[in-house]
Image (tube, rainbow, N blue to C red):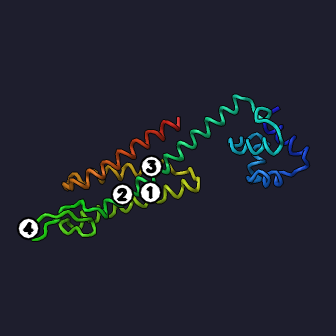
């Protein structure tokens, strides 16, 4: 007997509707319907709740192979979720490229390090590119963290690819305009994102 059939049988023995069972397990009725129809399986936490609620062992509900498969899938999801969150946080850290004194500015024949807000030596075009690139990265980071917290997977890869592309462009731009300190920080953030992206891709296989 498949898991869905077992769950349906246990539910009916207790005289519960799908909605009542869903309330008892703190999940949606759609989730219960999905499980009973064989279109999906609960995660490990939900399996524990089902096991406790019906006073049966998890082994009675699922075969060891299927349980292992669910555990592996959940582990991959957790790794991807963590990568998404870290990636977004690193993009949010791009704000340091705006607020830290990383840009050389000449004042009374002395060279000072100033932040982007106080930087006056750059041309208007260079300022627009810097502000546009860094603000865009911070915005991407905010969206990434928000989507991750809301457990929305759609568009995650696209956001990562876009972030990497903007990051590479900004590193090249800072290198061309000889912003030594800023390019080091931007390159470091890009490398951290690269490591996270590789881990994400590995977990997706």
Residue 141, which numbered label? 1
Residue 94, which numbered label? 2
Q: Nearer the viewer, residue 60 or 9?
A: 60
First reached walking from the N terminus: tag 1 or tag 3: 1
Answer yes or no: do the residues labelled 2 and 1 have beta carbons within 8 Å? Answer: yes
The residue under label 3 is: 160
Question: Would residue 204 appear left or right of 185 to someone viewing this image?
Answer: right
Residue at x-position 30% and y-position 54%: 170
Label 3, residues with CA under 10 Å away: few <14, some 14-19, many ≥20: many
In the image, residue 182 above or below residue 45: below
Distance from the alpha carbon under mark 1 to that under mark 3? 9 Å
**Residue 40 is drawn in which quadrant?**
top right
**Position of residue 42 measured from the top left corner of the image (x, y, whole percent):** 71, 43
First reached walking from the N terminus: tag 4 or tag 3: 4
Distance from the alpha carbon under mark 4 to that under mark 3? 43 Å
**Residue 106 is drawn in which quadrant?**
bottom left
Pick the quarter of the image with the N terminus: top right
First reached walking from the N terminus: tag 2 or tag 3: 2
First reached walking from the N terminus: tag 2 or tag 1: 2
Distance from the alpha carbon under mark 2 to that under mark 3? 14 Å
**Position of residue 147 measured from the top left corner of the image (x, y, whole percent):** 54, 56
**Position of residue 53 measured from the top left corner of the image (x, y, whole percent):** 81, 45
Element type where label 4 sits in the image: loop
Element type where label 2 sits in the image: helix
Residue at x-position 44% and y-position 49%: 160
Question: Would residue 152 appear left or right of 181 to someone viewing this image?
Answer: right
The residue under label 4 is: 109
């Amino acid at each position: 007997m498949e898991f869905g059939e077992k769950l349906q049988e246990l539910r009916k023995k207790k005289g519960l509707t799908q909605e009542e069972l869903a309330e008892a397990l703190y999940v949606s009725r759609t989730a219960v319907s999905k499980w009973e129809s064989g279109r999906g399986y609960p995660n490990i936490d939900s399996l524990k709740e089902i096991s406790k609620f019906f006073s049966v062992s998890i082994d009675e509900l699922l075969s060891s192979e299927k349980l292992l498969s669910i555990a592996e899938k959940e582990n991959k999801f957790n790794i991807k979720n963590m990568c998404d969150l870290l990636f977004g946080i690193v993009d949010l850290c791009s704000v340091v490229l705006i607020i830290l004194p990383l840009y050389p500015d000449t004042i009374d024949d002395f060279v000072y390090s100033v932040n982007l807000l106080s930087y006056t030596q750059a041309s208007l075009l260079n300022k627009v590119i810097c502000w546009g690139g860094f603000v865009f990265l911070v915005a991407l980071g905010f969206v990434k963290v928000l989507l991750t917290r809301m457990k929305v997977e759609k568009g995650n890869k696209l956001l990562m690819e876009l972030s990497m592309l903007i990051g590479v462009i900004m590193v090249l731009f800072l290198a061309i305009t000889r912003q030594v300190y800023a390019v080091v920080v931007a390159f470091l953030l890009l490398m951290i994102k690269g490591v996270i992206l590789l881990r994400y891709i590995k977990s997706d296989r």
